[in-house]
């Protein structure tokens, strides 16, 4: 992956830091998000995701470093390319005494859109038709999330900055929103910057993932790179587990056990030739009843990655 | 710019119209007017009262049962109540964005933060003007209903002028309250600030320094404290103007430059 040209970058931060007293909430984070890509920003709660997002939106002044969005330098009070940016920060909120429709009309007016066509389009797109006359304070958490997304998407932004966008949604809603965001990126050419603490969710959408931990960007990976960096193991089950494990150990294989007591061989060269291991065990009198190559789950990869950094 | 301001103002007015707090303040303004009328009714008919403290107080105070006395009381009520009601209006309009967590939704928009703040100031001022108008009209209507004796109709233009000046003073003095609502991130600290100002206004008014303490000035002007009664000195006018300007500057600087991490 080559170095992106400056003109192709829609988000760029250069060594951005933010301090709260002696606490480094964000520590010299340099992000480069390309036009049209879906970028996942992953971290545990309190890792610095929301603080970074607030700096991207000019809500917080960085202690040091620079922020550029759509090529414009961003600082509180300076204005920004906000007609091109849609966002949702933390828990979505709406003016509680206004109905869904009124909230969307207000969002539309503050985005300088004419008429109520955009509000109606969003109501249909986010399946809020049943709730148009319902006051925002009476919505369920899932529908508040939909309303927040509708407000962020209402003006067809070039850049969508979303902080935990699928929180509070049911599984069907998550799939629906995922498809909606993917469509925004693919069909409308929007760049999507999405933060989450859920790697499984982010990895389904994002082309590139940045991991923030204790305020620092500790790793950036492409989706393919992520797939390749997942640990793999050969999982075997035999009737005589103890005997097979001793035999494999004598043959020089590092043998582990999974939660169910099955044998795990994690060496990369082993995962590439499961049939050979199968044949060895059959010849030794331990015919496997089960052989499979299993991938490390994403959460384990994430915890391993931040654990490596912590060391 | 004007289109943006109109859009932001329309939204503020809609939010206000839909809110329960708007109806509560209207009810409070009406309640005060009715209570003053009730007091006049009792002054007019002291024998209707059973013997007790209230009857004694009315007799001792020697309140006249006529238009000048009635309007004098409504002016005093507006002077003291104005600080509370209008301060509450400004506290709510500004502080509710933090209470409801909606402030983050109005910080990165094509419509600038300055325009959003101006729209809020205008909406709050309109709200206060409406409350004053309600109290003014109700006072006249209830006074007419009670058939209070009237010696000169010149009283009414003077009453209108006092109401208008008192409202203007209270609105101008509410800008620091709006600033506190933002800087302290919520309605409650701003309401606390209003109560503190009212307490200090009473104190300064009662020790004869009312015309130099900003929030005592409307009360001094209406006669709620001190003895100035419907006179506004140049020093007082300057103090109100400077206090208001400091509040406005604080609002704009805070909205534009302060870190918004709530």
Image: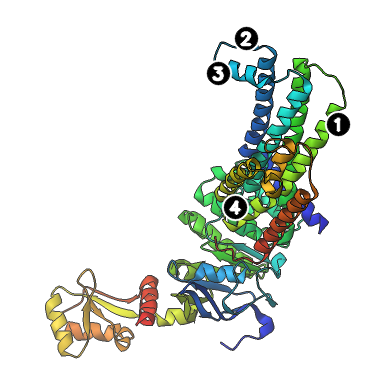
> Seen in the image, is A229 located left or right of residue A126?
left
Residue, disc 4 = A147
Residue, disc 1 = B157
Q: Secondary structure at mark 1?
A: helix
Image quadrant containing the C terminus of chain B: bottom right
Q: Residue at x 54, y 68 (%)?
A: A194
Distance between the alpha carbons at the discs numbered 4 and 2: 59 Å
Other-residue count near label 4 (Cα within 10 Å), few / some / many at <14 / 14–19 / ≥20:
many
- Callout in the foreground (1, 4): 1
Q: Chain of mark 2?
A: B
Q: Are marks 3 and 1 on the same chain?
A: yes
Percent of width and height locating residue B191 = 58, 46
Q: Secondary structure at mark 3?
A: helix
Q: Are marks 2 and 3 on the same chain?
A: yes
Residue, disc 2 = B48
Q: Earlier in the sequence, mark 1 or mark 2?
A: 2
């Amino acid at each position: 992956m080559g170095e992106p040209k400056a003109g192709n970058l829609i988000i760029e931060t250069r060594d951005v830091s933010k301090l709260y007293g002696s606490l480094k909430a964000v520590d010299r984070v340099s992000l480069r998000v390309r036009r049209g890509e879906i970028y996942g920003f992953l971290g545990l709660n309190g890792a610095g995701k929301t603080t970074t997002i607030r700096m991207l939106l000019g809500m917080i002044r960085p202690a040091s470093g620079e922020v550029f969005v759509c090529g414009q330098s961003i600082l509180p009070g300076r204005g920004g390319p906000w007609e091109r940016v849609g966002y949702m920060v933390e828990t979505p909120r709406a003016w509680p005494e206004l109905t869904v429709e009124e909230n969307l009309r207000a969002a539309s007016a503050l985005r300088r859109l004419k008429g109520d066509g955009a509000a109606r389009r969003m109501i249909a797109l986010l399946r809020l038709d049943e709730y148009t006359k319902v006051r925002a304070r009476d919505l369920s958490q899932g529908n508040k999330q939909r309303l927040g997304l509708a407000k962020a998407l209402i003006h067809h932004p070039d850049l969508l900055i979303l902080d935990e966008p699928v929180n509070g949604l049911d599984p069907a809603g998550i799939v629906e929103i995922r498809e909606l965001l993917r469509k925004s990126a693919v069909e409308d050419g929007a760049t999507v910057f999405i933060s989450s603490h859920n790697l499984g969710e982010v990895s389904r959408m994002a082309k590139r993932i940045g991991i923030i931990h204790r305020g620092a960007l500790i790793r950036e990976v492409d989706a393919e790179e992520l797939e390749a960096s997942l640990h793999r193991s050969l999982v075997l089950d035999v009737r005589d587990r103890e005997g097979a494990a001793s035999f494999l150990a004598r043959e020089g294989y590092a043998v582990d056990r999974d939660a169910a007591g099955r044998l795990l061989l994690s060496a990369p060269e082993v995962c590439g030739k499961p049939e050979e291991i199968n044949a060895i065990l059959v010849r030794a009198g331990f015919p496997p009843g089960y052989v499979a190559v299993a991938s490390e789950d994403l959460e384990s990869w994430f915890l391993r990655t931040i654990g490596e950094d912590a060391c | 710019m004007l289109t943006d301001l109109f859009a932001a103002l329309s939204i503020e007015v809609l939010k206000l119209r839909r809110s329960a707090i708007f109806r509560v303040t209207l009810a409070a303004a009406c309640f005060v007017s009715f209570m003053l009328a009730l007091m006049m009714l009792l002054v007019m008919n002291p024998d209707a009262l059973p013997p007790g403290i209230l009857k004694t107080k009315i007799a001792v105070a020697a309140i006249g049962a006529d238009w000048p006395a009635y309007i004098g009381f409504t002016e005093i009520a507006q002077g003291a109540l104005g600080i509370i009601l209008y301060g509450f209006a400004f506290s709510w309009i500004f502080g509710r964005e933090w209470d409801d967590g909606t402030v983050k939704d109005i910080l990165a928009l094509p419509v600038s933060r300055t325009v959003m703040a101006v729209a809020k100031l205008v909406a709050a001022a309109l709200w206060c003007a409406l409350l004053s108008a309600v109290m003014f009209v109700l006072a006249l209507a209830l006074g007419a209903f009670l058939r209070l004796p009237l010696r000169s109709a010149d009283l009414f233009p003077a009453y209108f002028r006092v109401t208008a000046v008192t409202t203007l003073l209270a609105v101008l003095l509410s800008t620091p309250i709006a600033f506190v609502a933002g800087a302290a991130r919520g309605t409650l600290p701003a309401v606390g600030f209003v109560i503190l100002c009212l307490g200090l206004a009473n104190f300064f008014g009662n020790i004869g320094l009312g015309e130099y303490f900003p929030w005592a000035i409307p009360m001094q002007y209406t006669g709620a404290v001190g003895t100035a009664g419907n006179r506004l000195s140049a020093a007082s006018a300057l103090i109100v103007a400077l206090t208001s300007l400091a509040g406005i500057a604080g609002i704009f600087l805070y909205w534009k430059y302060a870190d918004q991490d709530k």
